[in-house]
Amino acid sequence: MKINKNQTFFVVGETSLAAQCVEFLLEREHCLGGILSDDPWLREWAREREIPLFDTFAFLPEFDYLLSIVNPKLIPEWVVRLSKKFAINYHDSLLPAYAGVHATSWAILNKEKIHGITWHMITEQVDGGDVLKQSAFSIASEESALTLNIKCYQHAFQTFKELILELEKNRHQLKRQDLGQRTYFGAHKKPKNAGVISWDDDEAHEIETLFRALDFGNYPNKFCLPKLFVANNFLFPKKIQRVEKSSKLSPGTVVKTTEFELQIATKTQDVLLTLEKNEAQKTNLVVGERLPSPVGLQSLEKYCSQLSRVENFWVKELQRSNYLNLGCCSLSDGKREICWNLSEALPGEVILTTVLIYLHRISQQADFTVNYRSNEGELAEYRELFVADVPLNVSFSTEDTFARAQDKVLNSLKLLKDKRTYLKDLPLRYPQHIHHSQTTPGVIILKQWDSGLLGVGEMTQTAGQ
């Protein structure tokens, strides 16, 4: 039987699974036309092996097979048509169930017992193409998104090896999906109440399941975190588990507090929430106090879904931030803050540009970041969940005229207005991407056009607090 080796593959994707699949292709003496990826780790891995890297779909080489492996990008139809043979995608569910995004988390939230993975043909319908290979496995009772993702990777790689051997021998089989059984979860869909615990509605096992479904370990979490609403603020538990014995107190009642933990009663069992050091004590909660269930959570869920559409923008803005800290420099005559009455001065945009140019010169930094605060806000009852002071990244050149500098500032402000804000938990959900130094500003710009004021001063607290 003829073995079809020396086929050319082009890979679009991320993570170690894509790397494993590429290594197997090379072991089988196939050719690799290149990798298109935004994953820094995978790009560095490819560079070390002198594998061609691509940033966009423009000017791609010829290839027989297109492989989409842990790929968040929508591949244009014209790119799919470039494949001389097949365009194949990996999906982390047993299609047609759980098409879309965050399949493992939704499976845990829905208390599924069986999960699996699929290699399928890429078509115009997302995750709707004919199936080439599938593998099913059980979901353990204590499964988290992290552990279930690991299972998916393991089964994906094993079935990938089987698929490549079948393609080499032309023994692959295609199976049409029963799209009448299809379930789909979009990229911006959030869990109930955007992950906020409701003591009036949620039972202990539901709260614990929510935590496991949103636990991605140290990997980026583009989905959501569980949230505890306390004293008009939000806490993000590091761990949530059921307590075997129930206190039989009213739901939301504080049963026990320690330096790290809160034990709270629910409609069924109690739950034990592990927090950052001293965080439990900072709440000033006392045993016997009853936490209220937040209201308006459907509106919050909708708003969080909207903000997720611009989350990548804020991650990139924080990654390139270079917060300005004046140190020993004074803003004016030894003062640490200045405020202008705009009704008696120049337009606010002119003053703001002037201030930023001044900061640029006294700091001698061409590229720097200040935090920008406006009086525009939404969902006032949950304002503590969102960052009020967003990063304004500034880049000036010694060749910039004032008009040119003002254009840069106005363009940046327009972008910030369009993107609004982001959730305070963003650094927690992207621990490998956003560091503390990228969320600790020294200077803040206060904009209050409606009241006719603009101010600039130093800020000592952590951004978003």
Image: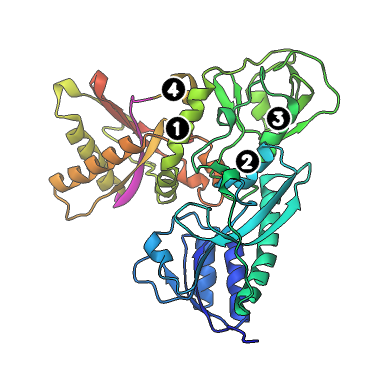
Q: For mark 4, what is the residue?
A: 379
Up-down relation of residue 86 to residue 317 (above or below)? below
Residue drawn 76% across the image and 33% down it: 241
- The earlier-in-sequence mark between 3 and 4 is 3
Q: For mark 3, what is the residue?
A: 206
Percent across and percent down for residue 128 are 53, 53
Percent across and percent down for residue 255 are 77, 19
Percent across and percent down for residue 393 are 33, 45
Residue drawn 57% across the image and 65% down it: 18
Residue 387 circle label: 1
Quarter of the figure with residue 411: top left
- The earlier-in-sequence mark between 3 and 2 is 2
Percent across and percent down for residue 362 are 28, 45
Q: CA distance from mark 3 to mark 4?
A: 26 Å
Label 2 Cα crowd, 10 Å radius (few <14 / some 14-19 / many 20+): some
- Tell me the amino acid under the disc marked 2: Trp
- Tell me the amino acid under the disc marked 3: Glu
Is residue 119 something one can see in this rendering?
yes
The residue mark sitting in front, 3 or 1, is 3
Do tag 1 and tag 4 residues touch (Cβ < 8 Å)? no
Up-down relation of residue 118 to residue 32 (above or below)? above
